Image (cartoon, rainbow, N blue to C red):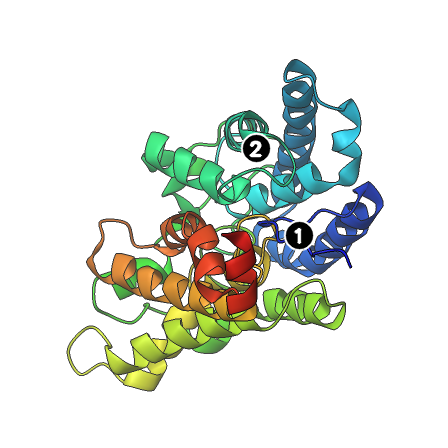
Amino acid sequence: MNTPVINTSPHIRGEDRVRLIMADVLVALFPAVVAGCYFFGLRVLVLCLISVLSCMLFDALGAFFCGRKFGVITDASAAVSGLLLALCLPVGVPLWLPVMGAAFAMLIVKQLFGGLGKNLINPALAARVFLTVSFPDLMAVYTKPFSYIPAFAWQPTLTDAVTTATPLTFLNGGSFPADVSLMQMFLGETAGSVGEVSALMLLGGGLYLLYRRIITWQTPTAFLATVFLLGLLFPAGENAFALRWASYELFSGGVMLAAFFMITDYTTAPVTSNGRLLFGFGCGVLTFLIRRFGSYPEGVSFAVLIMNFLSWPLDRLTWPRAARRKAK
């Protein structure tokens, strides 16, 4: 009788399986892209196209120079990373910015560590943090909905569109967003990154992934519940209505995008059910702490990247006892 072999994640079965999974993720992201185009204009499509093509190009170049199979580009994982990166950007960023983010995501985060299934952290989120730290002024300029920037403006100026503060800016200051209702945030009629504003579209895409069994319920549920409950228990500001505050925390920033498309990444998240619950809980706690006490209004990206490094220890902690004995 053969003894089962226990390996660490990820468990990649083949390019065909990976391609099908990535195709479903692209389909699930399509509603968020549509919402972004509706609220911010066709420049969203330009950013998405540049980001996707750049990620595919740098993924292929990285694989070539590392002596790996050039066909890795056909698994569509680079396209997913590119689309996620574009959705994490403000619509008014220069068109060269997603190219720089794609180079960092594919060459440094992915290919340098071994290619598909070997990266320690999420490439799209790592690229977003890299761009946020390197170009804070560009990444902090958000466009007001329906204030359209020319689609092919290489480096827009402040006169190209009406800029405004995001709801997170107000929440970080201890007050509710001015002139932005919960319904507007749920639908997406608010300032923010192009793919993060519509909670409705992201929720629809997440439910599609759950229906297709591409993701499981544990991680997104634990993450969303933790963010909501901490907002409910510890609302900021004087006389803040707790339920309303928690709802704003849930629908603002990258919470919904991360819940279904970032923290569910096969490579950088635990594989055990209990590990996924702890992973989602940890992401939620860190998001709350960084938003409340950090210098950046948004804490999701940093929270998920920190928890990515704890993915393997969480798997070891939550493995069945028999599996842990075999691993020793």
- The percent coordinates of residue 323 (x first, y second) are 56, 62
Are there few (<14), some (14-19), or many (20+) residues within 10 Å of tag 2?
many
Q: Which mark is residue 55?
A: none
Q: Residue furthest top?
A: 65
- Locate residue 159: give its quadrant: top left
Image vertical order of residue 238 relative to residue 304, above or below? below
Residue 197 visible? The answer is no
Which residue type does callout 1 highlight?
Val
Q: Residue furthest right?
A: 16
Q: Earlier in the sequence, mark 2 or mark 1?
A: 1
Closer to us: 255 or 155: 255
Q: Residue at x 49, y 77 (%)?
A: 183
**Contact, CB < 8 Å: mark 2 with mark 1?**
no
**SS for dot 2:** helix
Q: Residue at x 69, y 56 (%)?
A: 4
Q: Which residue is mark 2?
A: 110
Mark-to-mark CA distance, 2 and 1: 26 Å
Image vertical order of residue 185 relative to residue 125, above or below? below
Q: Which residue is mark 1?
A: 5
